[in-house]
Image (cartoon, rainbow, N blue to C red):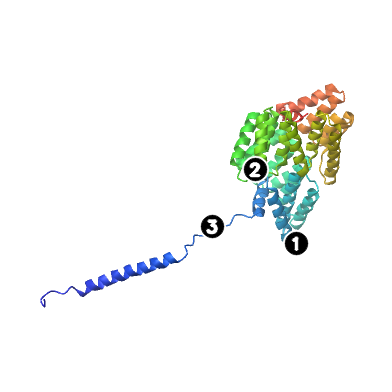
Amino acid sequence: MENQQKPPEGRFRTRRVVLASVAGCAVLGGVLVLLPWERPAEPAPPSPGALAMAAVNAGVPAALPDLAELIDEREKRLRAHPRDARSWAVLGAAYVEQGRRLADPAYYPRAEKALRTSLRVRPKGNTRALAGLAALANARRDFPAARRWGEAALKLEPRRWTTYPLLIDAYTGLGEHAAAKRTLDRLTELRSGPAVLARAAAVYRDRGWREDAAASLADAASGARAPAERAAYLERAGQLAWERGDLQDALRHFQEAVRLDPDQRAAQAGQGRALAALGRTTEALNAYRVALTKQPCPRYALELGELYESLGMPEAARVQYDLLRERVRGAAAGGADEELVLGQFEADHGDPREAVRRLRAEWRRQPGTEVADALGWALHRAGRHEEALRFAVRATEGEQGGGCAARCTRTTAA
């Protein structure tokens, strides 16, 4: 026993270190088990105002509740910082979109005041305000002003892609279809994505390239992120299907648009149009009434009035025609031009000669495809058939931009 060799002291020391480490790990593990497990905090979702801001900045449709939140945020900001040129421009653009979505021209003077205030605070290099004024002019159907403001914005920042769609709308409204196509080509060089695809579809449709337009809209809708944006593209796809006579496909697109965005009143009216053509008149009347309750657009009133007439309900039709006249007066008070729809109404339900007078003045100011179509029809109704034919050719000739699209839009539920 005495001769038995003792283990080296270092070995005991090593074993003590190992045991201490194991014990320490066990204790630490127990502490970690007892402590609450905290996951890394996920980033907060963007506020409704931020969502609307992103949509307005990108020139895409925004949800109405989000727009209301953005407007409230900017108004509060400007009360504290009245020389914030950027916030004035954002507020103006939001007013434009709100007025367009609600068919309420009362928003347009507010938009103009905000945008001009932005320019007064920052008179140089204020591309955002200039683009906002172009958007406002398009919403008012003042295409010469839209072209002027849009070209001024483009001169300041040629690579700002969101200005190009505004100019495309302005050139189209003026019948300058070659300029619209050149602008689209430049836009597609700078940018891709759903908003660009939707704008391309509008140009293709105006030139009579229906299949290309439908394909672009399908891609735009599938690529859209926000429900309101996707619903807007589906509504346009439904309108395109309606123009080519595919009523079931049109109805399907309109219904899906309303499901995604219940505030998509253009799609609601589109449902009424398609349902009436399918003979489902009770459903059609309900769809039109819902659309008009939330968005009293003169064109919807015209279509519903014509539907009532087709059903032998002249008194109900007159109520809608009175609403149309009232909304046209309200539009004029807000600086918006509804002479086109008023001329269409006069041609079919009033005085065709008055329609010709109004639409000639509109043609001299902004000779777009829709105006050519309406003027041609008014001339026909007034008995001036040879002159009517010239405008009908202008409206339906693909190279001029019509491609029969404009004539198809005059096909009503009646």
Q: Is residue 159 left or right of residue 33?
A: right
Say which mark, if any, is on residue 79. 1
Q: Which quadrant would residue 381 be assigned to in this image?
A: top right
Contact (Cβ within 8 Å) of mark 2 with mark 3: no
Ranked by sequence position, the earlier of labels 1 and 3 is: 3
> Residue 343, image x and y in percent?
84, 33
How much space separates mark 2 and mark 1, taking CA atoms? 35 Å
> Residue 106, image x and y in percent?
81, 48
Ranked by sequence position, the earlier of labels 2 and 3 is: 3
- Quarter of the image with the C terminus is top right
- Quarter of the image with the N terminus is bottom left
Kind of residue indicated by mark 1: Arg
> Residue 396, image x and y in percent?
74, 26
Ranked by sequence position, the earlier of labels 2 and 1 is: 1
In the rendered image, the vertical position of residue 273 relative to residue 158, given as above or below:
above
- Give neighbour class at mark 2: few <14, some 14-19, many 20+ (Cα, 10 Å): some
- Give neighbour class at mark 3: few <14, some 14-19, many 20+ (Cα, 10 Å): few
**Which residue is at the far bottom?**
2
Q: Which quadrant would residue 192 be assigned to in this image?
A: top right
The secondary structure type at the circle numbered 1 is: helix
How much space separates mark 1 and mark 3, taking CA atoms? 33 Å
> Residue 320, image x and y in percent?
83, 37
Residue 246 visible, this angle: yes
How much space separates mark 2 and mark 3, taking CA atoms? 27 Å
Q: Which is closer to the viewer, label 2 or label 3?
A: 2
Say which mark, if any, is on residue 260. 2
Q: Residue at x 35, y 70 (%)?
A: 24
What residue is shown with label 3? 42
Kind of residue indicated by mark 3: Glu
Kind of residue indicated by mark 2: Leu
